[in-house]
């Protein structure tokens, strides 16, 4: 396996609970760099520990992997404390709150502490917004910024992003996510979480949003896997019907097919990257996601990496496309769904 393949293989072993097989490799620094770019270093480190000693990285590089595990656990412990304070404060004030993105996904991972995250994203109703901020300030959270419908507050080292509406990619998805405390979520007290099929829809919509802006990173594809793997009650026919209603059906199929190819995600699909006419789309999209940072990156390595990134920016942004390369039908479908004109 080349560097990227082995990197994906180790992540797949983690998601599938399979002990990785060792290989004598001279590219551990490159694997470490990919892990850092994608914010999955602790997961790779966890799998490195399972390798035979003679197949692990050596010296300082091995220590870096080990330190990432320790740091991940410390951050996780700190985040649990911060989250408990945040949630109990809003609950005491009787304010419903919906936890989304990484914080809500972490419990689905084989080792929750290893799923890294940045800020903690929370939705509150617009009518509760100011009251929520005042309650949190009274509890001792530090105010970083407050806008009309979005605020940042901090406890210890953890930053909370408080929103009054969920992210959307088009008017159709905006309608779906306009009432997050109603039929698309379920509550335990004042704390809400999205129902599984809507959780998956939101993940895919969130990725599509970032693809429009340049890239997403492999961790977001892992998020697709863990929710499908953990919520067997998800009806994929219902899910794809929802995707078609917001005009991202082909994009959703491609993203789940990518998760299935990389991680053996248990999903029955009509779309597959094994088809011959999918090879170019798979090659470029996978290289761009694996080689980029969490939400894509404009800084690139060598010439081939630069070409890969150029493709991603041209595929998912309103930029000129190389006229010498004819789009496949699958590429045109994704352009159309994401509202992009490849000729502009």
Image (cartoon, rainbow, N blue to C red):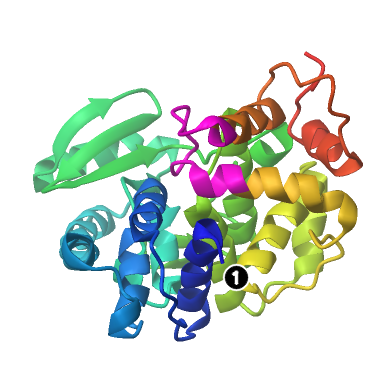
Write the residue at 35% across / 78% down.
Answer: 55
* Residue 251 visible in the shown view: no
Write the residue at 34% across / 83% down.
Answer: 50
Which picture quadrant has residue 92? bottom left
Of 186 and 101, nearer the camera is: 101
Of 294 and 54, nearer the camera is: 54
Image quadrant for the N terminus? Answer: bottom right
169 up-or-down from 190: above or below = above
Residue 217 at x, y = what percent? 50, 47
Write the residue at 64% across / 35% down.
Answer: 169
Label 1: how many residues lie within 10 Å, few (<14), some (14-19) or many (20+)? Answer: many
Residue 249 at x, y = what percent? 80, 49
Image quadrant for the C terminus? Answer: top right
113 up-or-down from 344: above or below = below
Which picture quadrant has residue 163? top left
The magenta-colored residue range is: 287-305
Residue 123 at x, y = what percent? 42, 45
How many numbered discs sit on the rendered protein?
1
Residue 303 at x, y = what percent? 55, 30
Residue under pointer 1:
263
Question: Is residue 293 in the magenta section?
Answer: yes
In this image, 273 relative to 154: left or right? right
Write the residue at 41% across / 36% down.
Answer: 127
Of 126 and 8, nearer the camera is: 8
* Residue 128 visible in the shown view: yes
Mark 1 element type = helix
């Amino acid at each position: 396996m080349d560097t990227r393949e082995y990197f994906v293989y180790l992540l797949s072993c983690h998601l599938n609970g399979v002990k990785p097989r060792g290989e004598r490799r001279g590219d551990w620094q490159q694997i470490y760099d990919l892990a850092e770019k994608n914010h999955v270093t602790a997961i790779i480190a966890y799998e490195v520990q399972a390798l035979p000693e003679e197949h692990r990285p050596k010296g300082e590089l091995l220590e870096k992997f080990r330190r990432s595990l320790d740091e991940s656990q410390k951050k996780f412990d700190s985040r649990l404390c911060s989250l408990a304070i945040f949630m109990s404060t809003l609950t005491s004030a009787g304010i419903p709150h919906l936890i989304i993105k990484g914080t809500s996904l972490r419990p689905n991972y084989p080792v929750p502490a290893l799923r890294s995250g940045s800020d903690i994203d929370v939705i509150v109703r617009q009518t509760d917004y100011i009251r929520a901020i005042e309650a949190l300030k009274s509890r001792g959270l530090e105010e970083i910024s407050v806008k009309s419908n979005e605020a940042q507050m901090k406890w210890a080292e953890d930053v909370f992003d408080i929103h009054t509406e969920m992210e959307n990619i088009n008017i159709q998805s905006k309608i779906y996510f306009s009432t997050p405390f109603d039929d698309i979520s379920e509550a335990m007290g004042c704390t809400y979480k999205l129902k599984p099929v809507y959780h998956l829809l939101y993940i895919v919509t969130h990725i599509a949003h970032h693809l429009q802006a340049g890239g997403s990173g492999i961790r977001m594809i892992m998020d697709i896997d863990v929710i499908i793997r953990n919520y067997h009650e998800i009806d994929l026919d219902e899910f794809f019907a929802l995707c078609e209603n917001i005009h991202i059906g082909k994009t959703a199929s491609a993203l789940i097919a990518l998760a299935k190819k990389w991680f053996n995600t248990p999903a029955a699909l009509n779309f597959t990257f094994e088809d011959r006419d999918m090879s170019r789309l798979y090659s470029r999209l996978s290289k761009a996601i694996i080689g980029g940072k969490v939400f894509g990156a404009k800084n690139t390595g060598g010439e081939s990496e630069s070409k890969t990134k150029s493709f991603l920016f041209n595929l998912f942004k309103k930029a000129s496309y190389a006229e010498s390369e004819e789009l496949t039908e699958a590429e045109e479908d994704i352009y159309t769904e994401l509202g992009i004109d490849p000729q502009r």
